[in-house]
Image (cartoon, rainbow, N blue to C red):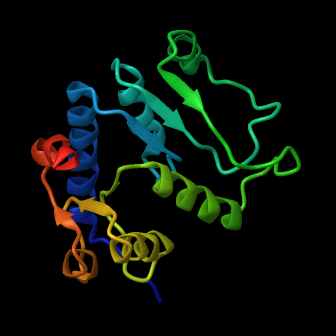
Amino acid sequence: MGSFVRPAALGDMIVKTYDAVRVLRDAGVPVISGIPFANGAECLSLLLRGTQPIVICPARSIEGMRIPSDWVKPLADNRLLVLSPFERKHRHITVTLAEQRNRFVAVLASAMFVPYAAPGSKIERLALDLLGCGKKVMTLGFDQGGRLTTAGAASVTADSLAGAIHR
């Protein structure tokens, strides 16, 4: 059985994640993401209101993909790039494609921000693998088992995130 965030902590985690995304946006930090997490659409909406470059990597081919209306202006302004390593035949998101996409994003990024990774989850395993390779990983401190911070992930606050990325 998996481990879950306590309901009281879940609300705090969501608010702190939104705060962190606003800090990245307001600091103009370029962001690359697959937006895989539950509140990812809301976070993307916050980022799209900024002026920083954004790269979105869907876990599927982008050939024939419909562009959401809120992406049109950032695309036209050349501050949004939609990028995928997948061929046309991969038209539907799968768990395997999402894992491959997450590794693709991690390789391209200079640092990885993981607000929370459930113990034993695929995101936790990815973050631990990246830490083992010397990649910078940051978390909001909701690491219940302590595995990410024990392995070297930086525990950051929303306010310190942008600065921690550049260190």
What residue occupies the far front of the structure in this picture? 134
Q: Position of residue 89 (x, y in %)?
A: 88, 49
Q: Residue at x 11, y 42 (%)?
A: 159
Say if residue 11 shows up in the picture.
yes
Q: Residue at x 44, y 84 (%)?
A: 2
What residue occupies the far bottom of the structure in this picture? 1
Q: Residue at x 32, y 69 (%)?
A: 134
Tell me: 32 left or right of 144: right
Q: How many labels sit on residues?
A: 0
What residue occupies the far right of the structure in this picture? 89
Image: 14 above or below 114: above
Foreground residue among 11 and 27: 27
Q: Position of residue 78 (x, y in %)?
A: 52, 15
Q: Position of residue 99 (x, y in %)?
A: 60, 65
Quarter of the image where one finds residue 65: top right
Q: Residue at x 19, y 41 (%)?
A: 162
Tell me: 136 left or right of 81: left
Quarter of the image where one finds residue 45: top left
Tell me: 140 left or right of 122: left
Tell me: 133 left or right of 26: right
Say if residue 118 shows up in the picture.
no
